[in-house]
Image: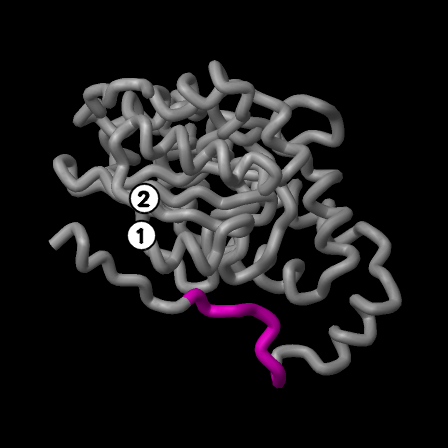
Amino acid sequence: MESLVLVPSNALEAATQIIDKAERKGVRLRLLGGLAFKKLCPSSSDPRYFRENKDIDLMGKREDSREIVKIMETLGYTPRELFNKLNLGQRLIYYDIANKRRVDLFLDEFVMCHKFNFKENILAGTYTLPITQLLMTKLQVVEKTEKEFKDLTVAFYDFEVTSGPDGIRGDEIADLCSKDWGLYTTFRKSLEALAAKAANLDGNEQARVIPRIQTLMSMMDSAPKSFGWRMRARIGERTRWYDLPDADGDSMLG
């Protein structure tokens, strides 16, 4: 039986430890959430965009769920037992009690205000999901806080919007939105709010961030829409098109 190892107090180092441990076991895990932006976006180190990143969010494969459980136990994390039993194969939650840190593991699907299947995306990138998928996880948030806007801003500052393999895949986002009116609507509102906030950036930042936001909105708007999209658009905002995740307090962390 493997002995327990010391969990680093630094959240990014702790996340890297989990990912490396999983890799040695033939299991691929990739970061999402605020730590992923910190890892992938150089601008996140700018004091203006600094934010606390205490917790860890990871994406893995459903088929690896039982091996993931063993890995987390070997590293000394405490499971949320009832939640994990009810959600095995979908999502797992663990705690690093000493550092008052929570670890969320999403399996195949990221489910919050909208649902995305990221199973294939964890095959790409090193340590994090690709920037396109990371951006989606922030654009899908309906009730945003300042931390989401900071992550989105550094993403658009550091990455161009493209139709190719590099940068923010505007073509991929536009294609998803062309089939789902609800997703399109949430993303469009998020981008409009981000553009309004970006108007307060300094001149050089505005010149870089705002055109990229506008490029993505233009790609989303111009993509041919499906029949289902057009039918849902007739109902419009009279019926809610998103979910609001339940409040999830962490009594284990005090």
- Identify the main secondary structure in magenta: loop
**How many C-alpha atoms fall within 10 Å of the one at disc 2: few (<14), some, or many (≥20)?**
many
Mark 1 → mark 2, Cα distance in angstroms: 6 Å
Q: Residue 212, image x and y in percent? A: 58, 37
Is any part of residue 136 visible from this angle? yes
Question: Are discs 1 and 2 less than 8 Å apart at CB?
Answer: yes
Q: Quadrant of residue 169?
A: top right
Quarter of the figure that contains the C terminus: bottom left
Residue placed most toward the observer, 253 or 216: 253
Q: Is residue 18 above or below residue 32?
A: above
Q: Residue at x 55, y 19 (%)?
A: 26
Q: Which residue in the protein does label 1 denote?
A: 80
The magenta stretch is 238-245
Query: N-terminal of the two: label 1 or label 2?
Result: 1
Quarter of the figure that contains the N terminus: top left
Secondary structure beneath label 2: strand
Amino acid type for the residue under numbered disc 1: Arg
Secondary structure beneath label 1: loop
Q: Residue 45, image x and y in percent? A: 30, 24
Q: Residue 98, image x and y in percent? A: 13, 36
Amino acid type for the residue under numbered disc 2: Tyr
Q: Residue 185, image x and y in percent? A: 63, 64
Residue 94: assigned label: 2
**How many C-alpha atoms fall within 10 Å of the one at disc 1: few (<14), some, or many (≥20)?**
some
In magenta segment, residue 207 = no
Is any part of residue 191 visible from this angle? no
Residue 58: assigned label: none
Q: Residue at x 79, y 67 (%)?
A: 229
Q: Is residue 18 left or right of residue 170?
A: left
Residue placed most toward the observer, 225 or 209: 225
Residue placed most toward the observer, 139 or 199: 139
